[in-house]
């Protein structure tokens, strides 16, 4: 996420906005868990996987709103 934006901007936003930092870290954690589940490394049921994907999407949408508001 945020591949097109300069990393310095993202880091600066994480330093000054605790909500952005928390959401960013949560999104990264969920992204790894979803990827592991899809690869079969993390054994979870489809319902839980769906919940994680929805939470990840919700975090991404909030992150993008915060980022857009800051720029």
Image (cartoon, rainbow, N blue to C red):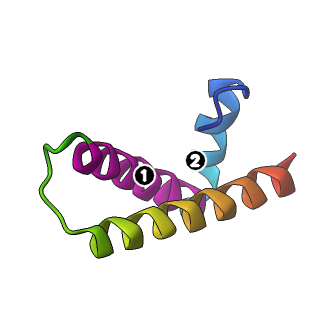
| Mark 2 closeness class: few <14, some 14–19, many ≥20 residues within 10 Å | some
Relative to 10, does residue 8 appear above or below in the rendering? above
| Mark 1 closeness class: few <14, some 14–19, many ≥20 residues within 10 Å | some
x and y percent of residue 45 in the render?
A: 20, 69
Q: Residue visible at 31% across and 75% down?
A: 47
x and y percent of residue 52 in the render?
A: 38, 66
Q: Splitting the image into 4 quarters, where does residue 62 fall?
A: bottom right
x and y percent of residue 2 in the render?
A: 65, 35
Q: Which residue is mark 1?
A: 25
Q: Give the position of the N terminus as an image quadrant.
A: top right
Relative to 48, does residue 44 appear above or below in the rendering? above
Q: Give the position of the C terminus as an image quadrant.
A: top right
Q: Taken as a whole, is the magenta stretch helix, strand or loop?
A: helix
Q: Which residue is mark 2?
A: 14
Which element is circle 1 on? helix
Q: In this picture, which residue range is highlighted in magenta?
A: 19-38
- For marks 2 and 1, the one nearer the N-term is 2
Is residue 7 located in the magenta-colored stretch of the structure? no
Q: From the viewer's perspective, is 50 left or right of 39?
A: right
**Measured Cα–Cα span from mark 2 to mark 1:** 10 Å
Residue toward you, 11 or 24: 24
x and y percent of residue 19 in the render?
A: 57, 65
Q: From the viewer's perspective, is 69 left or right of 42?
A: right
Which element is circle 2 on? helix
Disc 2 versus disc 1: nearer the observer = 1
């Amino acid at each position: 996420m945020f591949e097109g934006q300069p990393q310095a901007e993202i880091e600066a936003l994480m330093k000054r906005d605790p909500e952005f930092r928390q959401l960013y870290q949560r999104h990264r954690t969920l992204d790894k868990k979803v990827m592991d589940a899809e690869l079969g490394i993390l054994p979870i049921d489809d319902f839980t996987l769906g919940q994680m994907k929805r939470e990840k999407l919700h975090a991404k949408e909030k992150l993008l709103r915060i980022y857009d508001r800051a720029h």
